[in-house]
Amino acid sequence: MSPITTQRHGDILIVTSNNPPVNALGHAVREGLVKAIDEADADETVKAVVIVCEGNTFFAGADVSEFGTPKAFEPPMLPQVVDRIEACAKPVVAAIHGTALGGGLEVALACHYRVAVPSAKLGTPEVKLGIIPGAGGTQRLPRLVGVPKALEMVATGNPIGAKEAHGLGLVDRLIEGDLEQHAVAFAEEVRDVRPIPKSSERDDKLAEARANPALFDEFRKANAKKFRGFDAPEATIKAVQAAVAKPYAEGVLEERRLFMELMTGTQARAQQYFFFAERKASKIEGLPEDTKPRDIRRVGVIGAGTMGGGISMNFLSAGIPVTIVEMEQAALDRGTGIMRRNYEATASKGKMTADQVEGAMGLLNPTLDFDALADCDLIIEAVFENMDVKKDVFTRLDKIAKPGAILASNTSYLNIDEIAAVTSRPEDVLGLHFFSPANIMKLLEIVRGARTAPDVLVTAMQLAKKIRKVAVVAGVCYGFIGNRMLIPRQMQAMQLLLEGATPEQVDKVHVEFGMPMGPFQMADLAGVDIGWHRDPTRIENIRDKLCAMERWGQKKGAGFYDYDDKRRPSPSPVVAEVIEEFRQKVGVEKRDITDQEIMERTIYTMVNEGAKILEEGMAQRASDIDVVWVYGYGWPVYRGGPMFWADTVGLKEIVAGLERQQDRLGKDFTLSRLLTDKAAAGEKLTR
Ligand code: NAD
């Protein structure tokens, strides 16, 4: 049965889509819409049409399950569908609830009128999948809302609410009450209005941009940082420029050309791959299907330092009460003070109300009394990174935590099984590795211990969603997925300094690749002293020396770079001297280092480590590793992630690059067997 049905209400033909879950614009829907409009035109007694959707939402976009299949290209394609709707000789009204996104908005734009419930959202998220609207969206939208707003919507992909859309003229009427009934009444009102308003024929709202074409470059400049490296935002700008500079029909052709160019490129493939990678990450392999999560009503956090505070905020923001425990009142006050200031900063940007700040802070119970954790359902330890301290904390926890409580460690590197072993309930123990700043970073590594119970894992995954994190399951190994892959990168970066590269050169290669910062910029931001042995007389390498000099990074105004009072970096002559000193000490000859060598030694080696993680089963799938890198370290999503990227470079080339560098990679470096096997077989890491 077609997902599109029609029924009469007096003179009005009501066209209803019923294609759960989101009324995606799959082939059957597209075909049904064309037939329905044909029916309206053929029947003299039909005076107007209403298009409405059942279920949770209006057409929420293209059918992602059709991506890459012949069905996606089977006529009628969406451009034909929307043109057919606009060409209807009777007024067509789109009745919008839920979300009208992507192709869904393009359908609505082609309708002659749009009515919506106030909670509806409208937008063009295509850019987030590396493409642009391809069914006239970039040409019709500016004609309805004006160029500045259209640019913002298509280039960022962020939706707007129906109320704003109404103010802009994108929605003709806001509907309170029954949407279909009111849409039909609206259709009755406009049934005889002639000429029928067609968005493709309007150009009054283009006048502003025609008078001021410089606004496009201003928009580019204002967003340069956000769009850096991405192809799709620039294509959306060009498409809207075409809407202004050319007649509608030519603009559509330009949109099509740009759309096809992106569709066949690597970025769109990477971004669409990543869309699915993120969804796959929440599936945990090897659990009984009927595993039920445990109930989490109160969370305990131990340690109110950098991580403990941020971790707590996630739960408070989701309405879950938190008991936070510290050793000393001063540390507790400092920690809760920072949390409050963070919330207040959010409120000052208008993203939270004063009441919400008080509401969140009101859910917090700060205490020095360890026993107060007794009624918590999940307790997350975020104390110093030291095995003895952690063991001590878990021994005490084991005595006071209620039966069935989940005991988690936020350790960055330490062995979860060893920590679990000091308790009488290793099945309740796991790692929950948040990333700093923990209230902002989206990634959570769920570390599955040898004995972690299935329902503990399921609970963690569900809770991650609730606090809006993207969680990935990792096995127990040093540094888990993300930090483990940083190790070879960091080692090679330091070695490159000795051989003749500068911190600036190494960082530049990473930034040009698309990373938000390079290894040395990252060290300066996080703290050069993290993990340092803290003995200023023990100087074995460049980092020891910088730490002994208190060059701990941005927080000290000096690290691998010098910083001015606005934290702007400049190359450091002091660091250059330190490097020179060690170069002579170690007896390494200085030479010119190419950018390609930096890539091979610091990025190819990461791919190699990722492949090892995969072959050891420490990650469930290659795409999980990519999710870790995009959400944990800012790997450019248009390159998919390190595993996907390696596949686009070709595994043979990655292996060849590593072999070229083998003599320089140090005696401990070994090639991943999985990587070399797959390279030899012409296979991919991401399949
Ligand atoms: P931190 O030094 O800022 O905070 C640790 C806090 O724990 C201190 O306030 C300390 O007073 C408190 N503490 C120590 N022992 C305690 C005890 N027995 N009872 C109660 N409180 C105690 O450290 P952090 O940066 O927040 O790191 C905490 C953990 O998180 C470490 O395991 C670290 O490896 C991990 N981690 C850190 C980061 C990061 O970027 N900082 C990122 C991910 C994970």
Image: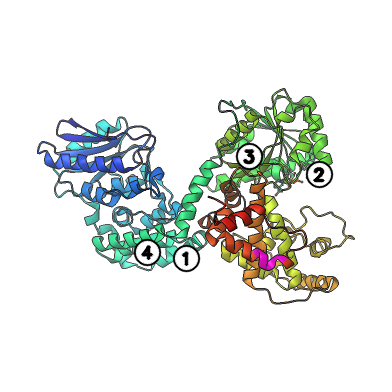
Residue interval drawn in magenta: 658-662
| Image region (quadrant) for ligand 1 | top right
Q: CA distance from mark 4 to mark 2?
A: 54 Å
| Residue 228 image position (x, y, % from top left) | 51, 62
Tell me: residue 280, above or below residue 498. above
**Crowding at mark 3 (Cα within 10 Å: few <14, some 14-19, many 20+):** many
Q: Name the residue tied to disc 3.
A: 313
Mark 2 or mark 3, earlier in chain:
3
The one of 605 and 172 positioned closer to us in this rendering: 605
Amino acid on which the number 3 mark rests in the picture? Met
Q: CA distance from mark 1 to mark 4?
A: 14 Å
Q: Does the magenta segment cover residue 478?
A: no
Horizontal relation, residue 142 to residue 322: left or right: left
The one of 13 and 419 positioned closer to us in this rendering: 419
Q: Name the residue tied to disc 2.
A: 386
**Crowding at mark 4 (Cα within 10 Å: few <14, some 14-19, many 20+):** some
What is the quadrant of the N terminus in the image? Answer: top left
Mark 1 or mark 3, earlier in chain:
1
Mark 1 or mark 4, earlier in chain:
1
Q: Name the residue tied to disc 4.
A: 238
